[in-house]
Each structure stands twice: as structure tokens, then as C-alpha cells.
Amino acid sequence: MKMIIDTDPGIDDAMAILYAAAHPGIELLGLTTVFGNVTARQATRNALHLVERAGLDIPVAQGENKPLVNGPIEPSHHVHGPDGFGEVTSIDARGTKEEEGAAAFLVRIARQHRGELVLCPVGPMTNIAKAMLLDPEFAENLAGIVFMGGALDVPGNVTPHAEANAYHDPHALDLVLKSGAAIRMIGLDVTNRVLLDAADFDTLAQINPAHGPFLQEMSRFYLAFYAARGQAGCGLHDPLTVMAAVMPDLLGFIRTPVEAVLEGAEGGATRRATHRPTIEVATACEPELIKELFFAPFRCVPA
Ligand code: BDR
Ligand code: CA
């Protein structure tokens, strides 16, 4: 499967990207970066580091550093640490980003691989909205969009109503939800039901000496954040999204139009709508099976 991950790495973003790199069924054509957990600049640095660490030779195109309409937002340092990788602050990146910006890159690659490219946005939707504004055919050139964001029938994680990626750019998300693209939403309805705890990161470190200890080290900060909120592990948000893309039968879906609330106390919420395209929203999952399947590609990567 040809895939681009649009990302704001981010601890669970790093897990998702290393999972995708290790998965034999995924051909990563590039990463595009966006503000969110960190600034777009830091996201690019982190993405370049992950690409090098995974031994990939793929482009990294930097995208937007602020939402489509709203003012700039503060990076989520309290969730992902000062540089996005928890307490791991000494990462290096020798590679350089593409000269082309993320939106132009997405438009070009989608055209080049018409009908074949699966896009996995796991940060705010800004770059994807920009690509749609740039090229009216962008949505139909894609095989589909499988995105991490939103919370349909469960509470949010940044406000009682809103999930972080949706909250950080509701206008962009709403534009994408209206586009008519083939969309699958992987929101908190499922991602917060698949939790990894310290023992799971021990397992990861054991089965994958190349990346496991790195992910384990950064997970400590993430787990502490969740523990402080009374949650016994971190949600498998971004990795589950990549998994759902490459294993389309992994989750159960309902079909409904969805809109993003643009402002007010419920700004960033995602809710059922009418008079707009139907999308698929993940609502059912088997957490233990998903965890096993998450570990699987990491077991096969040589040290
Ligand atoms: C989403 O927000 C970010 O903090 C995570 O990387 C994930 O994409 C979860 O709400
Ligand atoms: Ca993310």
C-alpha cells in the first residue's frame, strides 16, 4: 500500500512512523509535517530523525505552522515533552527537508499515483485542507484518507468535547470532512480503548533492540502524563490509524456524515451532521488483538 503520513511527531506519531516503516505491506512515499504536538520546524526535525533511524530514503516535506483560520496554537509540550519525544532531547537529523512545501508535495504525489495513495493524517488537518484548496482534484486522486482525530460518542481529550487534532484546526478538518474524499475517521472512540502500559514498552524494548528502547525511553513522559489523568496507559492513537489503513477490516465502522464544530465552548468537537458526504467512523475494536498486531512488525525488524 502506498502511503504518506502527515504528522506532528510527537511520541505516538513516532510509534506510528516506525510501525509503518517496519510493516512489509506499507510503502511509505514520504512524510509531511505540521504544527501540533510541536512546531512544524521541530516536527520536520523529528520526522527526519525517524526516517534516518528507520533506514528509509524518503522525502520529508514541511507544512503549516498554524491553523487555517484560527491564530497560532501553543505546542503540546505537557503531553509530548519539550521537543516532542518526551525526555529524549538529544536527537540529531542529518537529512534535509524538501524544498517543496507539504501541500504542494501532497498534490504532486497524489497526481503521480492517482487512485493508489492512502493518506494518513495524524496531526491537525491543515496541510490536507491546503492541498484541497490548491488542487480541486486532490481528494479524488487519493485512494482514501484514514485520519486520527475526533471523538464521536466519547468525551474529548483537550476539552470535554474536543480531541486534540480536531481542536487544533477545526476549520481544516471540516473542509476535509466536506470534501467527498473516501474518509475513515479513527478517533478517541477507538484509540483511547487500546492502551499501552510500561510492561508493553518493556516488551517492545525486548523484541526490537533497534527501536524498542528509544520508544520506551520517550514513553515514560507520555505514560506519566496519562497516569496524572488517571489513565493506566497511553492511547494507541496514531499507530492504530496506520494499522487501520493497512488492515481495513481491523476495526468496526459506522457510516455517517460528520462535521467539526468551528467555535464556541464546543469548538473542535466532531458530531453527526446532515447534508454532507458520508464518511466511515471507527467505533468498534478488539484491544488485545490490536496490541498483538501492533507488536508484530517490530518482532521482524533486525537489530
Ligand atoms: C492526537 O493528538 C496528539 O497529541 C497525538 O499525537 C495524536 O495524534 C491524540 O488526540
Ligand atoms: Ca499526532
Image (cartoon, rainbow, N blue to C red):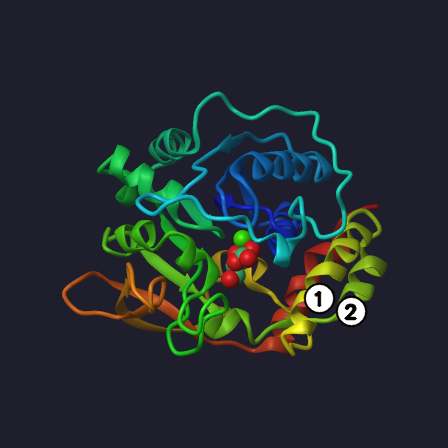
Question: Which numbered marker is on residue 198?
Answer: 2
Say whether residue 11 is left or right of residue 303: left
CA separation in Å, label 1 and label 2: 8 Å
- Could you say whether the residue bearing mark 1 is in a helix, strand or loop? helix
What residue would you read off at disc 1? Answer: 223
Q: Residue at x 76, y 61 (%)?
A: 220
Q: Residue at x 33, y 54 (%)?
A: 173
Q: Is residue 140 above or below residue 79?
A: above
Residue 99, given in percent of the width and then of the height, sits at: 48, 20
- Please say if the residues under marks 1 and 2 sit with CB atoms less than 8 Å apart: yes
Question: Which numbered marker is on residue 100?
Answer: none
Residue 34, given in percent of the width and then of the height, sits at: 48, 41
Labels 1, 2: front one? 1
Local packing at callout 1 (Cα closer than 10 Å; few below 14, some 14-19, many 20+) is many
Q: Quadrant of residue 141?
A: top left
Q: Identify residue type, mark 1.
A: Leu
